[in-house]
Amino acid sequence: MKAKASKNLTSLDEILDSKYGKRGVSRRENWEQEFEAFRLGVLLEAARTKRGMTQEQLASKCGTNKAYISRIEHNASDIRLSTLMKIIQQGLGGHLKLTLQI
């Protein structure tokens, strides 16, 4: 038997529309950008721990320092694309795939 969707459910987009405005509004775009930076930090931390590496070990492999890796993982630092690629390729042995949404 198929479950019916509840009419009382609110989607994430509806919540964000209400709190930050529709997509394209400056406040909403800022939230989206901060969320993506947060998500990147979480993904990097998960990949590092999956590899059984400390922040210091990762930093050493990709030519940066532990404090910088920590700042990225905790969304406290902007990161250059070239540095991100080094962390992923040299440090974690992975590959970076990007998507563009317009």
Image (cartoon, rainbow, N blue to C red):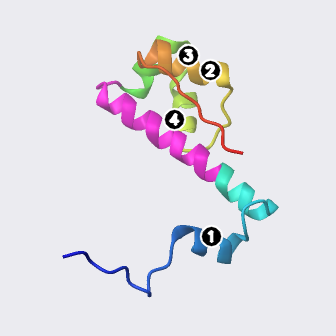
Of 95 and 54, which appears nearest the observer?
95
* Tag 3–tag 2 contact (CB < 8 Å): yes
The amino acid type found where label 2 is placed reads Thr
| Circle number at residue 70 | 4
Quadrant position of the N terminus in the picture: bottom left
Mark 4: secondary structure: helix
Mark 2: secondary structure: helix
Q: Earlier in the sequence, mark 4 or mark 3?
A: 4
Q: Residue 94 at what x, y percent from top left?
A: 43, 19
Q: Earlier in the sequence, mark 4 or mark 2?
A: 4
Q: Residue 66 at what x, y percent from top left?
A: 50, 26
Residue depicted at 51% across the width and 35% down the height: 70
- CA distance for labels 2 and 1: 31 Å
Q: Name the residue under label 2.
A: 83
Q: What stretch is highlighted in magenta?
A: 34-53
Q: Is residue 60 visible?
A: no
**Is residue 51 highlighted in magenta?**
yes
